[in-house]
Amino acid sequence: MTDVDIDHLRTWIGRERVKTDVITPRLAMGLNAVFDVSGELADGDDAPAGIHWCLAPDIVPMSQLGPDGHPARGDFLPPVPFPRRMWAGGELTLQGDFKVGDTVSRHSVIEDVVLKSGRSGEMIFVTVRHEYSTARGIALKERQDIVYRQMEAQKSVSNVATLGDEPAADRTLSIFGDPVLLFRYSAITFNGHRIHYDQPYVTGEEGYPGLVFHGPLQASYLLRMAIEDRDPPSPLAFAFRSVSPLFGGEAITLNAINDATETKLWVANAAGVKTMTATAR
């Protein structure tokens, strides 16, 4: 067992922060371009789904970055001593909409900090609640689950459910995990985490076999797919969970099954292993 002062880390529970940002045409068109969608956008147009993950990023000088490219911990997020940081999942509740030109306010609160032990060792989960508002009121509520791990070797993913565990998808889309795709998403979200673009770092320092596909990028693909498939076009609630790491440089499938009340979605890698599951209701 690692000597982690979890009681100290839990003193971050209840910490709040408010940040604002503007959905500019350039930001909205840039996000669309990541998803291979072209066309001009202007103030008043609908903003792309997942735009909230591009808003109000942490912007700090280079001297205030940690070795992984993230801002050093201990300000809003607790100073968790484990070096690996990943999104474990989350949930969105869509209550309004985002328009190009909107000024968006995000109110964030640390809800929980928990130490757990699993087959891959000790993990610390940090739960953050976000509320996004525009001049029209609350547009979106989000629960974000962040997991921190030690530098242990990657566990096998052979026990993770594969495509064969689900009925055939009603709809499947294929994409390629191009390193440029990962870099462009890092750029549009101002995410300096080196596991997404720095091949020598991610393989040599963190021991992954390749560049790591962003959790919110996977979630954005599934969210956009759910919105396209459902009537009305926006789901009321969208919950997602990472079940296995996804790496760039290979073919990826996006899958959906629709019924009268919900859409079940998942991302699968080239071997058919699920890497993220989601439900839109």
Image (tube, grey):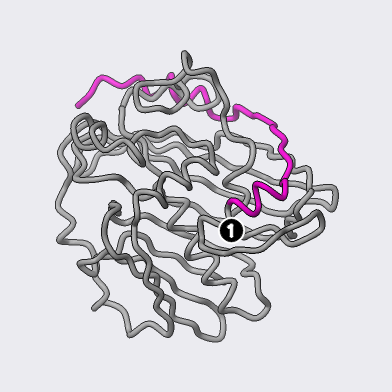
Identify the residue at horizontal 19%, vertical 27% (top origin).
1
Q: Relative to 130, does residue 32 appear above or below in the rendering?
A: below
Identify the residue at horizontal 72%, vertical 35% (top origin).
20
* 252 in the magenta segment: no
Give percent across and percent down for residue 160. 22, 62
The residue furthest right is 135
Instruction: Determine whether the residue tagged by mark 1 lies in a helix, strand or loop.
Output: helix
The amino acid at mark 1 is Asn
| Neighbours of disc 1 within 10 Å: few (<14), some (14-19), many (20+) | many
Give percent across and percent down for residue 225. 52, 71
The residue furthest front is 39
Q: How many tags in the picture?
A: 1
* Image quadrant where residue 230 sits: bottom right
* 11 in the magenta segment: yes
Specify start and end residues of the magenta stretch as a single range: 1-30
* Image quadrant where residue 159 sits: bottom left
Q: In the rendered view, does 162 fall on the left or right side of 31?
A: left
Q: Relative to 128, does residue 101 appear above or below in the rendering?
A: below
The residue furthest top is 63
Give percent across and percent down for residue 252. 32, 65
Which residue is disc 1 drawn over? 32
Closer-to-camera residue (169/130): 169
Identify the residue at horizontal 64%, vertical 54% (top origin).
29
Closer-to-camera residue (104/140): 104
Give percent across and percent down for residue 115. 34, 34
Identify the residue at horizontal 52%, vertical 25% (top origin).
12
Q: Relative to 202, does residue 96 appear above or below in the rendering?
A: below
* Quarter of the image that includes the C terminus: bottom right
